[in-house]
Image (tube, rainbow, N blue to C red):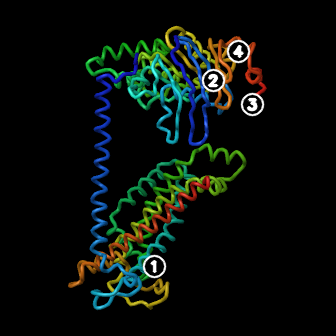
Amino acid sequence: MNAIETCQLSLWYGTFQALKGITLEVEQGGITALIGPSGCGKTTLLRCCNRINERIPSVRTTGEIQILGKNIYDADVSLLELRKLAGMVFQRPNPLPMSIYENIVFGMRLHAPPEERTRAVLDQAVEKALTGTGLWDDLKDKLHTPAISLQLEQQQKLCIARLLPLQPEIILMDEPCAALDIAGTESIEQLIRSWKGVYTTLIVTHNMAQARRVSSHSAFMLSGELVENGLTEPLFTQPKDPRTAEYVSGHLA
Amino acid sequence: MNRFATTPLVQAKLRQEALASYAALGMLVCILLPLFGMVGDLVWQAAPSLTWQFLTTAPTHGMREGGVRPAFIGTLYLVTISLAVATPIGVLAAVYLTEYAQDTWFNRAVNIAVLNLAGVPSIVHALFGLGAFVYAAQLGYSILSASLTLAIMTMPVIIASTREALLSVPRSYREACWNLGASRWQTIRAIVLPNALSGILTGVILQVSRAAGETAPIMFTGAVFYKAIQPGTLLPYALDEQCMALSMHLYTLSTQTPGVAASIPNATAVLLLGLVFLVNSAAIGLRTFLRSRGK
């Protein structure tokens, strides 16, 4: 079963075509890496998956994206529900300007009916989300301090933690470690690996070593086209397309 | 199966959304209706007097006939001179406050004082102008006194808006410049000011309308009820003379002169609006041009 299936997906920013007929399947519960040089369209593809692109004027899309078996461009798709089930982690940590606690319950306040948002429920959700991202022991005594005051690594983990109470099925990550040091990168990667079978993870990365470390499947994009995709190890060791071979060996700018 | 169906909770949220957006739209209409109503009514009432002669002739028969040429030119004088004085001083003061001044209690106090000055009623500036320029500096009741009073009035707002514009230039631009060995002033000239220019202009534009519209400051310092000027020249006033001005003229027509046809004050008001509109459009055009040039 596939969590995400795009079919002939094309996207234009004005007259510039950023995606050219992408057809890609993303396995449910798996970890899939999108690789390719800057400007190849991988972030654009990622942002299509929860339709966060659409507030940008002049964006035009054709084709289909099936998420959890439903074309998300259908008229009966609620964007609010879509984004709840397909959450995104951005390149720079972007905690909301409020306390750690409020950051985590923010999504619940948006999505759960008031009678389900008792103090106990919220407290429990915060503990669970922070435990799930390995932050609980460090932060349990300062839940009400501003999220902005945390270190970058903690901020990024908090941005991941605040998705979890919504019980997402898909987590979209746009170079989540770009702003972090080696230790931070390692612990985020560990977290991603632990999601195997729980969440479907689609991760954009410039770091090919990272793609090999965390993903089971990889897709290589170049100038808006999907060049090659499949299991990560064969893609890196025996690429079928010469352009893939060039890129993974580090020769293509 | 549609996992993203519209649940009742989502429906409630969409209803709230519709309500909020319609409320916001409604408020916009509430603002636009009176605005268009007012301008429309003004133009309607002014129509009989809106001729080319109105702009090019002086008032005659005790203001009951003729045009507003001396007042129109007087307003151009006052606005031009006051902003020519206030803009460089205000911008440089803001440059000092943002780019050079250390963050001390004194400078913070100056900043707060500037913000407060921006809120001082124009009649207070008028009184200050009367004491400072007319009497103490012995400039007398003159265009110079009136323009300087308007400059004092507009300067704090120009300082405040320039400061905002300067602060919105990213620090990384300055650091890049310093790292190449540029002095502070070179950085300001080459990077900070050009990038803040459109924000600075916005502040100055707003002050054009204020300088053109305020009556009290010029009434105290240099604007008169009636002044005959030489026809046919573009610069009929000397700076130490008194002058007529559109705002003052509008006031005297409406309150001090019996038996004036309603179309004359209305046409004066339309002219004042037109002037401000013209200057603002030109400045907005300039700003768009500067932005499109990549700053």
* Residue beneath disc 3: A253
Q: Mark 1 against mark 3, which lies toward the viewer?
A: 3
Residue B133: % across, % down? 42, 77
Residue A19: % across, % down? 60, 31
Q: Amino acid at mark 3?
A: Ala
Disc 1, SS: helix
Q: Residues under labels 4 and 2: Cα distance?
A: 15 Å
Image quadrant in which you'd find residue A27:
top right
Characterize the local packing of mark 1: few (<14), some (14-19) or many (20 or more) Cα atoms within 10 angstroms.
many
The answer to whether tags 2 and 1 share a subunit is no
In the rendered image, which quarter contains the C terminus of chain A?
Answer: top right
Q: Residue at x 62, y 11 (%)?
A: A216
Chain under callout 2: A
Pointer 4 or 2: first along the chain: 2
Image quadrant in which you'd find residue B140:
bottom left
Q: Is residue B219 left or right of residue B91?
A: left
- Tag 4 near tag 3, CB within 8 Å: no
Q: Which mark is residue A205?
A: 2
Q: Amino acid at mark 2?
A: Thr
Q: Amino acid at mark 1?
A: Leu
* Residue beneath disc 1: B144
Q: Residues under labels 3 and 2: Cα distance?
A: 15 Å
Q: Which mark is residue A235?
A: 4
- In the image, is residue A1 above or below residue A12? above
